[in-house]
Amino acid sequence: MGAGHGHRLFFHGHSPIHRAPAHLKVLALLGFMLVVVATPREAYVVFVVEALVLLGVVGVSRVPIGYLLPRMVVEVPFAVFAALMPFIAHGPRTEVLGVTVSEPGLVAGIALLVKGSIGVLASLTLAATTEPQDLLRGLQRLRMPELVVQVMGFMIRYLDVVTAELGRMMTALRSRGCDPRSPRHWPVLARSLGALFIRSYERGERVHLAMLSRGYDGKLPS
């Protein structure tokens, strides 16, 4: 099924990674992440090897690391949680830079941060080297349920629409003196996000009804 061509995560290129079949890249990502997740928390040498392998793939793909790093901001919540683990975990205590922390929490936090960073960078590399419609076709070749692939396709297609609508709402709020970053205006922001959710839900209903009126029977035309 189709999706928007040239999504914002995609970096146009002609490297061997770009040309590789999408389903093989998905399998490679899954296999690589299984190895990363299964790596013991204190196997730091293995983490270094995994990171070097990933950086090698990024190098072969010729996607600038400066293109990928800003998009890793999605990892911030996990990084914050990893940073808190040494302070909230129990167990033997140790001192780091004059601060007493939990030793098991420190080890777990470092492992979580490293594994999360590797996973996010690997996923971004896949997104940067694979067009959305190629990725969807690859998932179909891997026998992923058709309905799941369709949902993902519509999500990709309408993500930019919803994002643009959110941008217009934020512009309207700021023009009326509302600062979304101020806690005083968070109730207004919450109501706006609720309205955006309702609009998106209603848009989905309209799209579904339009599909049914055109003979949709669970499969989209190829």
Image: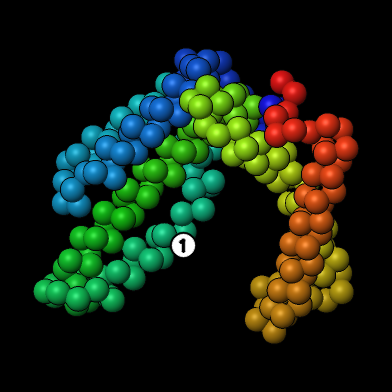
Furthest residue to the bottom? 184
Kindly identify which residue carries mark 1. 77
Residue 119 location (% of width, % of height): 39, 43
Compared with 66, 187 (above or below) is below
Furthest residue to the left? 92
The image quadrant that residue 37 belongs to is top left
The image quadrant that residue 7 belongs to is top right
Q: Nearer the viewer, residue 151 or 157?
A: 151
The amino acid type found where label 1 is placed reads: Pro
Q: Nearer the viewer, residue 83 or 138?
A: 138
Tell me if residue 9 can be seen.
no
Q: Which of 207 and 42 is in front in this view?
A: 207
Residue beneath the point at 34% across and 63% down: 82
Question: Quick check: 27 left or right of 164?
Answer: left
Residue 214 location (% of width, % of height): 87, 33
Residue 123 location (% of width, % of height): 46, 38
